Image (cartoon, grey):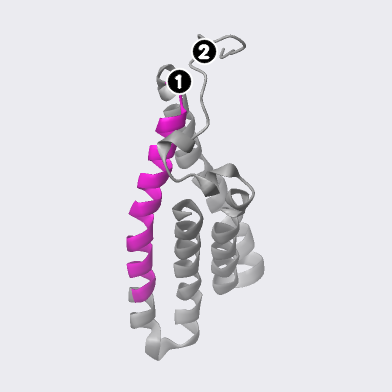
């Protein structure tokens, strides 16, 4: 459940930033609130997602998994910056920030339909084949 709630908190905190521009006399406390919520939720999300990834990935595939995650985490922001510039040109800064925040919130929707949402303890996690069992194949 934490993997569902924390991205929503992070996206919600990012929705506060455009709001701060609409009410300048409350901008400082609103930005402070946004930073507080982000700072609270982000480490919790990181710990949970990394722990789950490492727990369900066979040991011999840990390097591939971490390389793929690193590629996505550091590679996609380049495309995001390009898309942000295009959206900023058409919708302005506040509109682009709202679109980005809504995108962050919607990024966790897949968890609602996934068995990951109901995992509580390690014994409930799906059995991952190590590659040595009958019927397993990992290139």
Per the image, the residue denoted by label 1 is 61
Circle 2 packing at 10 Å, graded few (<14), some (14-19), many (20+), is some
Q: Which mark is residue 131?
A: 2
Secondary structure under tag 1 reads helix
Instruction: State the residue at coordinates (33%, 62%).
Output: 40
Instruction: State the residue at coordinates (49%, 44%).
Output: 119
- Left or right: where 85 falls relative to 9: right
- Left or right: where 80 falls relative to 70: right
Q: Which mark is residue 27?
A: none
Residue 61 is one of the magenta-drawn residues = no
Secondary structure under tag 2 reads loop
In this view, the residue in front, 58 or 82, is: 58
Compared with 87, 113 (above or below) is: above
Which x, y percent locates residue 85?
58, 58
Residue 38 is one of the magenta-drawn residues = yes
Instruction: State the residue at coordinates (54%, 64%).
Output: 101
Q: Residue furthest right?
A: 90
Which x, y percent locates residue 83?
60, 54
Q: How many marks?
A: 2
Compared with 100, 77 (above or below) is: above
Compared with 34, 44 (above or below) is: above
Which x, y percent locates residue 26?
39, 87
Instruction: State the residue at coordinates (53%, 52%).
Output: 81
Circle 1 packing at 10 Å, graded few (<14), some (14-19), many (20+), is some
Q: Are marks 1 and 2 in contact (CB under 8 Å)?
A: yes
Which x, y percent locates residue 16?
46, 75
Marks 1 and 2, how far apart at CA: 10 Å
Which region of the structure is painted magenta? 33-58
Residue 24 falls in image quadrant: bottom left
Please tell me which of labels 1 and 2 falls first in the chain: 1
Magenta part, dominant SS = helix
């Amino acid at each position: 459940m934490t993997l569902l709630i924390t991205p929503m908190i992070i996206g919600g905190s990012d929705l506060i930033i455009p709001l701060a521009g609409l009410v300048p006399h409350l901008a400082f406390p609103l930005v402070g609130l946004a930073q507080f919520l982000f700072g609270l939720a982000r480490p919790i999300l990181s710990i949970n997602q990394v722990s789950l990834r490492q727990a369900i990935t066979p040991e011999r595939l840990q390097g591939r998994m971490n390389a793929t995650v690193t590629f996505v985490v550091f590679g996609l922001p380049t495309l995001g910056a390009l898309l942000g510039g295009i959206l900023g040109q058409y919708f302005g800064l506040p509109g682009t920030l709202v679109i980005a925040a809504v995108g962050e919130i919607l990024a966790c929707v897949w968890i609602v339909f996934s068995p990951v949402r109901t995992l509580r303890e390690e014994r409930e996690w799906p059995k991952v084949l190590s590659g040595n069992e009958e019927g397993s194949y990992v290139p």
